[in-house]
Amino acid sequence: MIDIFGTIGPSCRNVDILKDMFKEGMTGVRINLSHTMLSDNEVVLDMVKKASSACGIKPKILVDLQGPELRIGELKKDIHLNAKDNVTFITGKNYANTGVCAKESVDNSIPVDIRVLDRIEEGDEILLDDGKILCHVTEKDDIKASAKLDRGGILTGRKSILIRNKTVDMPTLTSTDIVNIEAAAGLGVTGVMQPFVRSKKDLTTLRTKLQEAGGSNIEIYAKIENMAGVEMLDELIPECDEIVIARGDLGNAVPLWELPALQKYIAGKCRKQNCRFMVVTQMLASMEHSLVPTRAEVSDIYNAASDGASSVMVTGETAIGDYPVDVIRFLSKTIYEYERTIEKNENFF
């Protein structure tokens, strides 16, 4: 059976809505810990357990750690960016020493980790918020980098940042991750998603921390989000319980037209080594605001299942979307249709 995961957020943080989602076929949930602590989600976890119990389901509960994913800092308010606008990347420490007083400059200043700023050079392409926003660096000095927008959007705090074709050395686990890992076993977490896995060491580090925290039975989901992870698949697969084909950041690491082949490659590697894998990101993205998905989206779900996926997951569709229950219904029914055709050995080709 293929697992169906929904991400918890404001749109479904309600026992009755969660109950309806489980009734429609949801078998597990994801809690994103990029902006919150696991201990702050105890009420939500109780809702999940109460709703699933009412439906006779023992759900899988996944937590998605911060890990080494790069993010911008907090913003006082959202920044509305248009193509050809200028932005300035600064560090929190240096912000007060830049002498920037003009309202426009302050509004378009984006705080980043000093390790990110050190890696930025003139001419670099920088992607923000999973690639929704794109800019190129026009000038760089010791305390800031100036860039011009090629593709705009609305930028909020703590969104992802990626320097095209560059890596930034960051620790596997943040101090926040370690606190959350220590709380995981006691709160009924069944799996931990490790972002931006780069090497076997990332997974053994996580495994050790889980064991030390009494979570030796908690499964590890290794998120493949960059080419370093793709290149190290053979050593990653034995160290995790499930590979996650995380197409958001992976789609920033390569041109988008190369992403489908990369997904097929990872799926093939997992099948050969008898490793479970999950497909995630934008499976039903249009349903954040539409009651009906696109034909391409349901085909994507069916194809993921036919490639051998052990699980599929939606993120913003259920976390902040308008129709979380309908999202799970379309996801579940498409998976069911695949399983029905396999069971009846139907062949349309």
Image (tube, grey):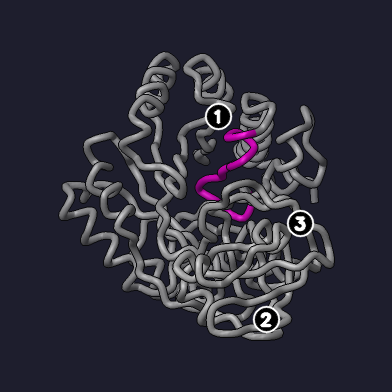
The answer to whether 252 is drawn above or below residue 335 in the figure is below
Instruction: Residue 135 in the image: state x and y as whole percent.
Output: 73, 70
Q: Is residue 270 visible?
A: no
Where disc 2 sits, the SS reads loop
Density class for disc 2 (Cα within 10 Å; few <14, some 14-19, many ≥20) is some
Closer to the chain start, of discs 3 and 1, is 1
Could you tell me which residue is drawn at 40 percent across and 72 percent down? 170
Q: Residue at x 46, y 44 (%)?
A: 32
Callout 3: SS: strand
Q: Which mark is residue 307?
A: none
The residue beneath circle 1 is 10
Please state the horizontal and vertical placement of residue 98, each as a whole percent of the image: 56, 72
Residue kind at label 1, given as amino acid type = Pro
* CA neighbours of label 3 inside 10 A, class few (<14), some (14 to 19), many (20+): some
Residues in magenta, as a range: 306-320
Q: Is residue 312 magenta?
A: yes
Q: Are marks 3 and 1 in contact (CB under 8 Å)?
A: no
| Amino acid type at image mark 3 | Leu
Question: Residue beneath label 2, please?
Answer: 124
Judge depth for marks 1 and 2 and give the one in front.
2
Q: Which residue is mark 3?
A: 81
Q: Are marks 2 and 3 in contact (CB under 8 Å)?
A: no
